[in-house]
Image (tube, rainbow, N blue to C red):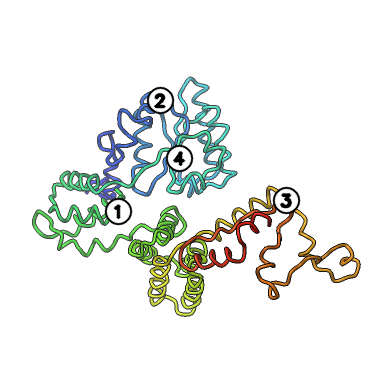
Amino acid sequence: MDVSEQKPLASQYRPRTAEELVGQDVIWNPASPLWKLVHGDRFHSLLFWGPPGTGKTSMARLIARLVARSVVELSAVEAGVKDIRAVIQESKDQLLLGGRATILFLDEIHRLNRNQQDTLLPAVEAGDIKLIGATTENPSFSVNNALLSRSLVVPFGKLSLEALSKLVIRVAAERGRQLEEDLVTALARAADGDARAVLNLLDAVLSVATEQEPIGLEASRPLLTMIARHFDKKGDYHYDIVSALIKCIRATDPDAALYYLARLLDGGEDPLFIARRLVIAASEDIGNALPTALVVAQGAMAAIRDIGMPEARIILAQVTTYLASSPKSNRSYLGIGEALACVKATGDLRVPLHLRNAPTRFMKEQGYGEGYVYAHDDPMKAAQMNNLPDALRGKTFYRPSDQGSEKQIAEYLKRLRPKDELKNR
């Protein structure tokens, strides 16, 4: 057997030409900035950011061939500062001999710590190397600002079903096999935008297929369950799905909220992590429009801690649908934000004398506690006192909405604080 045929299909069928690079037409076409920079050999540092199996490494190798430069590939999982400096020095030596700067392709660049990333800065700045970094993590968080400011970030999207289907058909044909259309579609869907995953699946299908062509879906169906759905509990996809859950609750969409809850659970997320996020949402997005939402969310978190999975999914579903179906108000959230901003802007303003304790005779003589109204004796008069520092007299931070229970709060405050009185507070 040919040694090359022992390699996985994903390795054998990496794109060798621009035409074979599928699914990234947005960033790689004659009118795109990346195309023009590469064909003009005018790039210095590129950061390829996107999910696994979207062509980042293949693009880097293609670029090296197009600009006819030597390329050194390192994985930040294994490489350290010593390896990076060796590549930089080798490239400098080539430049001194009249050669061209080496392309350093650093896969998983986000795995380098800040100090290790700093090693690249002088060489990139001086043009001693051309850097291409690949990352599945958001560069805004995973790449230090100095390197980020010297680089162009190229976002790679998941490959479409159409692109993956074309890839499967082409590779199968080159192997002399034919697949039924429903199997092609099933493979593309199972791979979830990942070219490497779809080729690994195809490899398995071709290896075990015993039926005559074309190969059908039914015989291959068990293999489709052997690829894990993409969910990284520490990566961008994790936070994207959590964000989607909370935003669907905020948008009063219980169906979408349940879907994203299911995505989190299916991916193996810690149910307590989800519960904590729901407690936050109960206060931030529902607040006083339905004060019991916070009680329900806290109760769910306690129950989940006691019970655990798989039954915890039922409790999470209940609180998710309860929160998503509740009236919404973020006025408490906005209020504390305004109050904190005010404190930062105005500093330590003096507390009004009538609010200060007066445990000693001297303090009473200084006016501490004078004019204070005990609210239980006269709620209306107490509510009309100016309890803010004089510089903030009349300032409002909490503005109740007209949603749910908060509408009653607004009416209650209005009764206690008539407009004229509020102006003088």
Question: Taking 88 as reference, is 323 above or below it?
Answer: below
Q: Nearer the viewer, mark 2 or mark 3?
A: 3
Contact flag, marks 4 and 2 (Cβ < 8 Å): no
The numbered disc on residue 192 is 1
Image-based side of 66 in relation to 349, left or right = left
In 3D space, how far apart are the residues under numbered discs 3 and 4 (Cα atoms)? Answer: 53 Å
Question: Taking 233 as reference, is 165 above or below it?
Answer: above
The numbered disc on residue 41 is 2
Q: 13 or 379, which lies in front?
A: 379
As helix, strand or loop, the secondary structure at mark 3 comes to: helix
In 3D space, how far apart are the residues under numbered discs 3 and 1 (Cα atoms)? Answer: 58 Å
The numbered disc on residue 391 is 3
As helix, strand or loop, the secondary structure at mark 1 comes to: loop
- The residue identified by callout 4 is 133
As helix, strand or loop, the secondary structure at mark 4 comes to: strand
Location of residue 62 by image quarter = top left
Q: Residues within 10 Å of mark 1 (few under 14, many from 20)?
A: many
In 3D space, how far apart are the residues under numbered discs 1 and 4 (Cα atoms)? Answer: 23 Å
Q: Earlier in the sequence, mark 3 or mark 4?
A: 4
Q: Amino acid at mark 2?
A: Asp
In 3D space, how far apart are the residues under numbered discs 2 and 1 (Cα atoms)? Answer: 33 Å
